């Protein structure tokens, strides 16, 4: 039997996982609604909260969809669908998949046809993210206490410390952007896409600040991602062709 990254079995597994997640969401939604009623909140206010939060989920959903589309050529739809819908994020899933693919000597532009390769990539993506599930409940209280201690002792250095942590995280992902710049002009495509994405985000920031479009704060990230993705689709054939 030939292996297929979009097989019916994998779709069934993905659907089962997604339905389980949706069932959890409905369960906690009902519990939260009932608790709100117990606290004396009006039905109108509760419906307003449900509606507004539903609208705010659109932006993250777009980001998830982009992640699924980005990885679908390489891994098919079911696995990225599971990963992005439950715990994954494109900022982790793509580098993890790319690292595994590089170790196996394949490109992300290829569709996996070997089950052993597919399993290896899936395990790398899964094992790599497990610490983010296990460690926070164990270490978060201690880490948060240490960070508050630094901030309370010296607010200025506390802010610098927090900014340094954020910039350190960003720097780790920037390495992927500059990894192939020595391979010629095609190696600069990730850099061009990064600059376009940053420019779009900057424009969104100006619109929010100058025109008071506060609603754009929710969608700025998704807009910059979509814009950068479209730019990448347009510029890649031009540079590599």
Image (cartoon, helix red, strand yellow):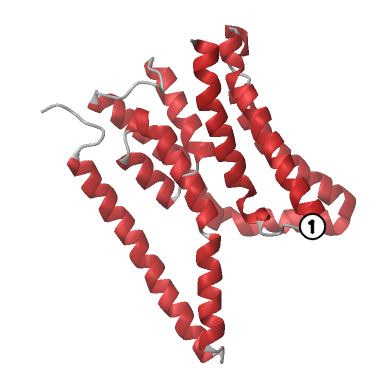
Res. 160 visible in picture:
yes
Residues 15 and 126: in front is 15
Q: What residue is rendered at 57% in x and 8% in y?
A: 183
Neighbourhood count class around disc 1 (C-alpha, 10 Å): few under 14, some 14–19, many 20 upward:
few
Q: Quadrant location of residue 145?
A: bottom right
Q: Residue 199: x and y, percent?
A: 71, 35
Q: Quadrant location of residue 17?
A: bottom left
- Residue 222, placed above or below residue 182: below
Q: Residue 54: x and y, percent?
A: 50, 66
Which residue is under mark 1? Answer: 149
Res. 154 visible in picture:
no
198 horizontally vs 234: left or right: right
Q: What residue is rendered at 37% in x and 17% in y?
A: 106
Image quarter of the N terminus: top left
Residues 162 and 111: in front is 111
Q: What residue is rendered at 64% in x and 23% in y?
A: 192
Q: Residue 135: x and y, percent?
A: 53, 50
141 horizontally vs 90: left or right: right
């Amino acid at each position: 039997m030939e292996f297929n990254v979009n097989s019916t079995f994998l779709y069934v597994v993905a659907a089962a996982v997604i339905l389980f997640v949706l069932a959890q969401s409905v369960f906690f939604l009902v519990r939260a609604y009932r608790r709100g009623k117990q606290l004396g909140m009006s039905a109108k206010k509760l419906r307003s909260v449900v509606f507004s939060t539903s609208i705010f989920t659109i932006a993250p959903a777009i980001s998830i969809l982009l992640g699924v589309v980005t990885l679908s050529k390489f891994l098919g739809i079911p696995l990225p669908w599971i990963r992005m819908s439950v715990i994954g994020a494109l900022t982790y899933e793509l580098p993890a998949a790319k690292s595994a693919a590089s170790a196996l000597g394949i490109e992300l532009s290829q569709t996996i046809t070997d089950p052993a390769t597919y399993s290896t990539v899936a395990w790398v993506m899964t094992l790599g993210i497990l610490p983010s599930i296990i460690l926070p409940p164990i270490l978060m209280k201690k880490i948060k206490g240490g960070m508050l201690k630094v901030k309370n002792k010296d607010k200025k250095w506390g802010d610098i410390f927090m900014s340094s942590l954020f910039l350190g995280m960003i720097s780790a992902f920037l390495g992927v952007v500059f990894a192939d710049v020595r391979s010629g002009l095609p190696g600069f495509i990730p850099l061009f896409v990064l600059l376009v994405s940053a420019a779009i985000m900057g424009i969104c920031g100006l619109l929010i600040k100058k025109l008071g479009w506060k609603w754009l704060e929710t969608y700025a990230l998704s807009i910059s991602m979509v814009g950068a993705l479209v730019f990448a689709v347009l510029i890649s054939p031009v540079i590599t062709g």
